[in-house]
Amino acid sequence: MTSFGHDVYDDVIVGGGHNGLVAAAYLARAGRSVLVLERLGSTGGAAISTRPFVGVDARLSRYSYLVSLLPAKIVRDLGLEFAVRKRTVSSYTPFERDGRPGGLLVGGGESRTRESFARLTGSEREYESWRAFYGRTGRLAEKVFPTLTEPLPTREELRARIDDEAAWRMLFEEPLGRAVEGHFADDLVRGVVLTDALIGTFADAHDASLVQNRCFLYHVIGGGTGDWDVPVGGMGALTDALAAAARAAGAEIATGHEVVRIETDGRTPAEVTFRTATGEGRVVARTVLVNASPRALAELLGEAPATAPEGAQLKVNMLLRRLPRLRDTSVDPREAFGGTFHIAEGYEQLARAHAEAATGELPSVPPSEIYCHSLTDPTILGPELVERGYQTLTLFGLHTPARLFEKDNQQAREVLLTGTLAQLDAHLAEPITDCLAFDADGRPCIEAKTPLDLERELRLPGGHIFHRDLSWPYAQDRSAAGRWGVGTPYANVLLCGAGAVRGGGVSGVPGHNAAMAVLGH
């Protein structure tokens, strides 16, 4: 049985994903005894880099893949050797009108973006609306993002800090569809804006719950700019740096240790039971920080879990021998795929896909978006692959809730992947399959993950990438969430994963905030 360095730890952290590692590093640096227990054979959770294709030297961000919400403060505080790179193009959205292929390019300088809008819409009005809309969200981001690593504000405190009633109403009170339709006239432009509200979130533009608004908010406030950056070395570079920082500060990390039970009365030290390949063991902790979903936490405490969340995405990883040629010859594929390449994400297409999925049918025209990591950061590929011009593609499909895969996950995955690639092919001058690389066994280098696959591999409940629907970044009930938004009914058990208030995405924010709560800040 495993032998640890302490009989009683100040802090035991359940789960070695990036948030758990952030918490471990902060707490160990404060001089506390810290033990991280991770079920899998390595740390990182969903923020890892792996070589998924046999015999191919390509280290891909297999699950999570871009960075926006990670505060520079955490990188500085923990002395992480980690960097991100900006993408020169924000997005490219191909279209066909009057039988002619074209594309909306956002990036490459203001003049090119303005010209691209004008070619699409016939005037500059839509571009001016774009500038006004994102100018407003940009000003809001500058005020909201710093609050994520501060004590949890109340709704009215955050509203006063934003100090823009029109922006508050647009994002916090009215369905986002109203603002999108009020600002933009073109269906394609509307769709590009809406997509940020639907990443991993199954909702309509006019959903009364405003879950789409919350998703959009987190996508436009990152870094105070809303930029989505490429992690140098892949996502695993971040979690490797975090694990190194935690260990250097004195934290112990035990992989292959699955926590199966937490027993506590909330006042006296908790007993944490774990399972390994050789049997069960126990460790005592003054505080337990749980880097798992709220649903998993309830099960560990022996309580009835909350309603199961439902993820809604298709994640596809590809390795190409070369980028495909585009039907739109006015843009270089290196630019088109260097940003976010939107596919079948017009406003009406998104609404139709949502309506079909809501009735239990796979979308007939699956919406998705793609980007190429290796264009911005070729270090994830071996030197020989770089020299031969190989590239990666990461695809993220929308409006594919877990319920669509429950009857036959494998068949639904294959049908959806085929349909999704067909939508991409409609804008290419050659099939994407003709560009795929092959692994050492002669198989094409492509893999797809459904919500059920993510639940099985990563224990994401319902395959939900945010552990549950995203929260507003303010206190709904400060007494329940606590000063930092990480509280549970037990004073010595804190939530430090994506399901905490202000959790979701690769941010480290819940890990930071849980550590601050423990340290009494």
Image (cartoon, grey):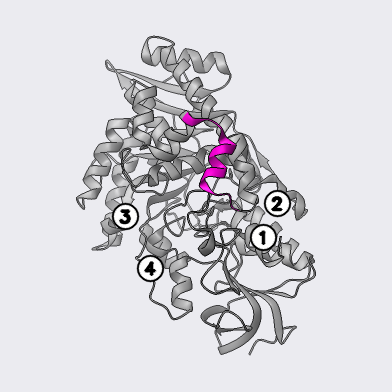
Magenta extent: 152-165
Query: Could you tell me residue 67's position as x and y percent?
Result: 59, 45
Residue 413: mark in rendering: 3
Q: Is residue 519 above or below residue 501?
A: below
The residue carrying mark 2 is 74
Q: Are marks 1 and 2 in contact (CB under 8 Å)?
A: yes
Please state which amino acid type lies under the numbered disc 4. Ala
The residue carrying mark 4 is 306
Q: Nearer the viewer, residue 341 or 514?
A: 514
User: Which one is earlier in the sequence, the residue at label 3 or at label 2?
Assistant: 2
The residue carrying mark 1 is 22
Please state which amino acid type lies under the numbered disc 3. Arg
Query: Could you tell me residue 521's position as x and y percent?
Result: 71, 60
Query: Could you tell me residue 413's position as x and y percent?
Result: 31, 55
Q: Identify the element where label 1 is drawn.
A: helix
Figure quadrant of the N terminus? bottom right
Q: Identify the element where label 4 is drawn.
A: loop
